[in-house]
Image (cartoon, grey):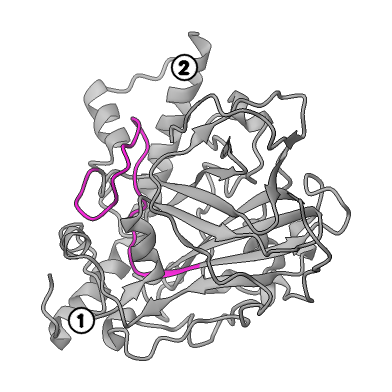
Amino acid sequence: MTILISSLFLGALLSGSFLPCVNAHGQILGVSANGVYNDGPNIYYSGDAKNAVTAVRTMYEASGPSYNLPTDFTDDSKMACEGASGAPATIQVSAGTDIQIDWVGATSELLNKPGTGDKTWPDGEYPWVHAMGTVATYMASCTNGDCTTFDASQGSWVKLEMDGLDLSQSISDDLRSTMAGKPEAYYPTGAGLWGMAKFVQDGSSWNVTVPSGLQNGQYIVRHELMAVHNPLTSSDATTGPQVYVGCIQVEVIDGGDVTLPEGTPAGSLYAPDGDFAQYNVYSDNGANFVNPGPAVWDGASSSSSSSSSSSSASTSVSASSSTVDSSSTPTSSSASVASSSSTSNSTTSAATSASTSSGKCRKRRNAKRMVQKRRHSFGHATH
């Protein structure tokens, strides 16, 4: 059976012009450590060569949910790595050095918009689309010695950092204006910089420091974006904080004798009925937000932060190797306001807009995924 799709519809669908959704998704584009860039998986085409050498676990299937909600908060598997099984490779990183984690959005709403960083995005790749929420990093040891087969639901997760709401800083005027035009108005209306806004301003990229002196071995770095733009309502199960989890398999080298302390099961990181699950960014306007979850480990470096770098070196890795060796030589570039006060009417409008768009967006995302899957399939079949 032949499936015909008009070029106009296909172009509009892929460009995101039919997808003005407030809960658009995304994933890890790739990671850089010890001068080596490792691409994240292609969720739309399983035959992509990079899927055989990625150290990034597949966050979600193209046809499945792209994030966790409060109803998932007690699920050890979903909250660990969104239920993903092991990736085929690990990437080496020296203790005390940074891992750069690049994310990609799935819709074009913020593409080339002011305040989203200086990165030049290749065709079909876009900036992250949410600016309100936390950015956190956890780490767990692969206790079986092999992260490619380790069951992440059994991980003991240690919090290395969480960047929540910093009331001593403010979002850039450019990004505030861009979010208002999305539309997804940024709160707080006055001072206050979300970790996620910092992340977007720096080109949808983040740096995290592997603890200095950490014992050599294999670990999973769990990177987490928690968007708060769609507050929980009791009548709508699709609302609440959206938790996007990406897991990177690393082999720590040049380490010492520091071991991770006892951590927390993924399904116990956040309470499904706690303050964070019920947080309303519009009515609170940033006044009472508290970082959720366990405390940051005092042995973790405090230098983890968003990255101002907009590009990374890319290294091709043989599919026969399960570990990406840091001695490999990089060969190419990675493809890689509002008023200070708000009325109750505008607050209600913003929250209502976020909630009512949620259900429609899921169907549109699935349509886009199917078209992208066909596009990748056709492209590989003709080359």
Q: Are marks 2 and 1 in contact (CB under 8 Å)?
A: no
Question: Three-letter amino acid code at disc 1?
Answer: Gly
Q: What is the span of residues highlighted in magenta in the rendered image?
A: 112-135
Total residue callouts: 2
Q: Give left or right: position of 297 versus 60.
A: right
Image coords of residue 380 (percent x, y): 51, 16
The residue at 78%/75% (across/down) is 261
Q: Is residue 232 visible?
A: no
- The residue beneath circle 2 is 378
Q: Give left or right: position of 110 versus 292.
A: left
Q: Earlier in the sequence, mark 2 or mark 1?
A: 1
**Which disc number belongs to residue 190?**
1
Query: Does the magenta-highlighted stretch encompass residue 230?
Result: no
Element marked by disc 2: helix
Local crowd size for mark 2, using a 10 Å CA cut-off: few (<14), some (14–19), many (≥20): few
Image coords of residue 66 (percent x, y): 50, 53
Image coords of residue 235 (percent x, y): 40, 78
Image coords of residue 7 (percent x, y): 26, 21
Q: Residue furthest top?
A: 383
**Which disc number belongs to residue 29?**
none
Q: Residue furthest bottom?
A: 288
Q: Is residue 164 visible?
A: yes
Question: Which is more toward the observer, 97 or 140?
Answer: 97
The mark closer to the camera, 2 or 1, is 1
Element marked by disc 1: loop
Question: Three-letter amino acid code at disc 2?
Answer: Phe
The residue at 61%/24% (across/down) is 49
Local crowd size for mark 1, using a 10 Å CA cut-off: few (<14), some (14–19), many (≥20): some
SS majority, magenta: loop
